[in-house]
Image (cartoon, helix red, strand yellow):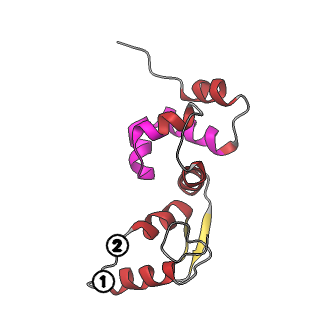
Amino acid sequence: MAPAPDFPAKARTAWGAPPDWIIALAEACQRETQSGVARRLGVSGSQISHVLANNYAGRLDRIEQLVRGAYLGATVNCPVLGEISRDRCLDEQGRPFAATSSLRASLYRACRAGCPHATHCKGAAA
């Protein structure tokens, strides 16, 4: 049986002096599993692996915000829900419009109406 990966060591090797959120990500992978962390963040396990190896070609800022919300306690003030974690904010932004839920409809409209925390919604302020 192969030994468990040492995620913090992998991050230190790849990053040199990793930022706090990379350390938090590596420690979360060590405590849980890489796939468990990926599920919590709503990304793939290979994305987590590439981020820790410092060779991720996608939007690193988005992964950073997910990690900060999920593992470092970063919050935002949502105009609909009040104070929520940053990772939940990003998750809510990605959800489709649902006329069957007044809350979903309100969130969808608020996100696209210039919410300062919106990052990937059509018409959002970046």
Region in magenta = 21-47
The residue drawn where x is 55% and y is 75% is 124
For the residue labelled by badge 1, is the local secondary structure a helix, a strand or a loop?
loop
User: Compared with residue 9, is residue 74 higher up or lower down, i.e. above or below?
Assistant: below
Q: Mark 1 points at which residue?
A: 101
Does the segment drawn in magenta span residue 4? no
The residue drawn where x is 61% and y is 30% is 11
Which mark's residue is nearer the viewer, 2 or 1? 2
Q: Is residue 104 left or right of residue 80?
A: left
For the residue labelled by badge 2, is the local secondary structure a helix, a strand or a loop?
loop
The residue drawn where x is 34% and y is 72% is 96
User: Compared with residue 96, is residue 58 higher up or lower down, i.e. above or below?
Assistant: above
User: Compared with residue 43, is residue 115 higher up or lower down, i.e. above or below?
Assistant: below
The residue drawn where x is 55% and y is 55% is 62
**The quarter of the displayed image where residue 12 is located:** top right
Q: Mark 2 points at which residue?
A: 96
Give the Cα distance between marks 2 and 1.
11 Å
Does the segment drawn in magenta span residue 40? yes
Q: Residue 66 placed where, x, y %?
A: 53, 54
Few, some or many residues within 10 Å of mark 2 (<14, 14–19, 20+): few
**The quarter of the displayed image where residue 38 is located:** top left
What amino acid is at disc 2? Pro
Q: Residue 77 placed where, x, y %?
A: 60, 75
* Principal secondary structure, stretch drawn in magenta: helix
Q: Residue 71 placed where, x, y %?
A: 56, 50
Of the image marks 2 and 1, the number of the one nearer the N terminus:
2
Q: Residue 85 placed where, x, y %?
A: 54, 64
What amino acid is at disc 1? Ser
Quadrant where the N terminus sits is top left
**The quarter of the displayed image where residue 16 is located:** top right
Q: Residue furthest right?
A: 17
